[in-house]
Image: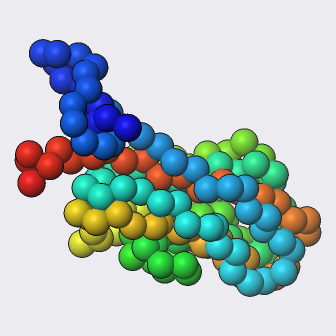
Amino acid sequence: MPKVIVTDTKGLHQVTGTGVEGLEAIKFSSKIAVGVTQTNYDTAAISIPANALITDLGYICVDALDANTSTTLTFSFGTAAGGAQLVTATQLNQTNTDIAAGVTQSIQLGNIPHASGAAIPYKAGAAYFSATARDIFMRVTVGGANMSNAGSVIAFVKYCIVPSASL
């Protein structure tokens, strides 16, 4: 497959090589079930290519995360399963408050899941760029108390490729 480049002068054009430069891309995990039990729920790897600069990380709540009396819902993102190298584990819901189906949160949006929730924070000193291909993972932790009903989420990674000529 040829390399595709988008520039202001030439627009979209092909050159020798592979990949895409000049555009942001987004990759999604498969939907993961978040069960009622207090434990960790991890996405499968989301693979991004070499020279990728991560510009955003987030999730989509597909089926409501139905919190119980003292349920906490903590999210983290890392470069290893269960890791928090990119986003430190952060409780996003107010204790015992649901995250409704359709809610989407990301670092760039800076939004909260409901009136008293928390935003997904950038992690100071995190390596959002890598010259090598790598995998990104999201972890959801149900804590405090079991949930009333199971739910599901999809993680996403938004990135752009830094041109090799710039490195």
Task: From this view, report whether residue 165 is shown above or below residue 119.
Answer: above
Picture layout, residue 13 above or below residue 40 = above
Q: Nearer the viewer, residue 44 or 109?
A: 44
Would you place residue 153 above or below residue 132 in this image?
above
Residue drawn at the location 82% of the way across and 60% of the way down: 151
> Which image quadrant: the N terminus?
top left
Residue 75 shows in this picture: no
- Where residue 136 appears, as percent x and y from the top left, is 47, 66
Question: From this viewpoint, is residue 34 visible?
Answer: yes
Count how many numbered circles sit on residues in the image. Answer: 0
User: Residue lying farthest right?
Assistant: 148
Residue beneath the point at 8% across and 45% down: 165
In the picture, measured across the screen, residue 103 lies left or right of residue 20, that is: right
The quadrant where residue 4 appears: top left
Q: Residue at x 47, y 43 (%)?
A: 26
Question: In the rendering, at what x and y percent does residue 56 appear?
Answer: 41, 50
Above or below, 37 against 47 in this view is below
Q: What is the x, y in percent for residue 21? A: 26, 37
Residue 17 picture location, percent across and down: 25, 42
Q: Residue at x 23, y 63 (%)?
A: 131
Horizontal side of 112 relative to 94 (left or right) equals: left
Q: How is the image coloured?
A: rainbow
